[in-house]
Amino acid sequence: MTTITMTTSEYGHQVIKVNRRFVSLAGRFDSIEKQGSYTWTGKADGRDFVIYGGTKSGGRANEWFVRWDTLGDFEIKTSSAAECVRVINNS
C-alpha cells in the first residue's frame, strides 16, 4: 500500500515522503492528504492537484498520474507516486 505524506524532518524542513522514504523537500507543496484508495489531493503554489494510480485504482503498479492546474487541464503519466511528486515540485 502506497503512502504519500508531508512531514517535518529532523532538521525542521517540510519534506514529502512516499512509503516513508524521503522524495523531496516540500518546495511548492502547501498541503497533501489521502482522499481514498490510491488518490491524494492537495495544493501546490495555491493550485489544486490530484495524484492517483497503482493497482488499487484499476491500473498497473507502474501507472501513476498527476493532474495539476498549473500544468493544464490534462493528466501526466508517470511510473511511480514519487515521480508524480517530482513532476509537481520541478515544474
Image: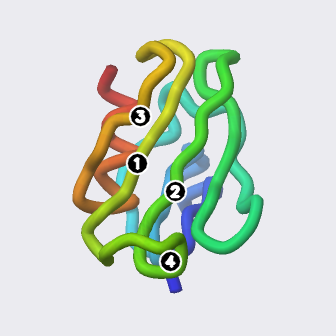
Name the residue that disc number 3 marks: 75
State whether residue 17 is above or below residue 57: above
N-terminal of the pair, mark 3 or mark 4, is 4
User: Looking at the picture, which amino acid does disc 2 mark?
Assistant: Tyr
Residue occupying the point 31% across, 77% down: 61
Q: Nearer the viewer, mark 3 or mark 4?
A: 3
**Mark pair 1, 4: CA separation:** 14 Å
Q: Is residue 82 left or right of residue 2?
A: left
N-terminal of the pair, mark 2 or mark 1, is 2
- Asked if the residue under mark 2 is in contact with the one under mark 4, i.e. CB atoms within 8 Å, the reply is no
**Mark pair 3, 4: CA separation:** 20 Å
Residue occupying the point 31% across, 62% down: 63
Q: Residues within 10 Å of mark 3 (few under 14, many from 20)?
A: some
Residue occupying the point 76% across, 59% down: 35
**Mark pair 3, 2: CA separation:** 10 Å
- Asked if the residue under mark 1 is in contact with the one under mark 3, i.e. CB atoms within 8 Å, the reply is yes
Front residue of 75/88: it is 75
**Mark pair 2, 1: CA separation:** 5 Å
Name the residue that disc number 1 marks: 65
